[in-house]
Amino acid sequence: MKTKSPSKKRKRLYKAPLHKRHKLVSGHLSKELRKQLKRRSLPIRRGDEVKVMRGKFKGRTGKVSKIDLKKLKVYLENVKRKKSSGEESFVPLHPSNLLITNPVIDDSRRKKAIDRGKKK
């Protein structure tokens, strides 16, 4: 983004296409992973183990079950809320409040992306 105007930045955030939204759903890596992968953050994807760092569910860890690119939210397997009907539903979390502790790196495309983003 080449602008300093907050309103223009917000507009571009809300109107971003899906291929750019994937980057916006990024989370910081744990200290051990930072040293190992030589980068600070990674886009979160399904199957990654993350730890909640802020909010009501602070300290909980779990696997990512779903990512909503439209709302820019992440859903974890064991972070649920009880509805008034008694049914349980997943709680949407913002990716900036999550710490990636165990990423899924078995995919060749993700390995390439990690290598591409390494600091020299």
Image: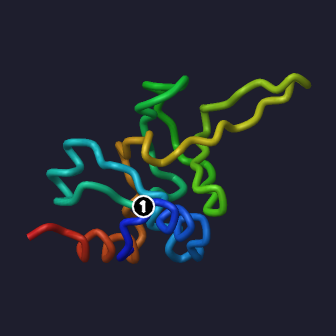
Query: Which SS class for mark 1?
Result: strand
**Could you say where residue 67 lies in the image, as x and y percent from the top left?**
60, 55
Q: Which of 6 and 74 is in front in this view?
A: 6
**Could you say where residue 103 lies in the image, as x and y percent from the top left?**
38, 53
Image quarter of the N terminus? bottom left
Relative to 32, residue 113 above or below: below
Q: Is residue 33 left or right of residue 64?
A: left
The image quadrant that residue 37 belongs to is bottom left
Instruction: Kindly identify which residue carries mark 1.
Output: 43
Residue plotted at (14% across, 51% down) = 35
Q: Nearer the viewer, residue 51 or 7?
A: 7
Q: Is residue 72 left or right of residue 101?
A: right
Q: Residues within 10 Å of mark 1 (few under 14, many from 20)?
A: some
**Could you say where residue 78 lies in the image, as x and y percent from the top left?**
60, 32
- How did the renderer colour the structure? rainbow
The image quadrant that residue 49 belongs to is top left
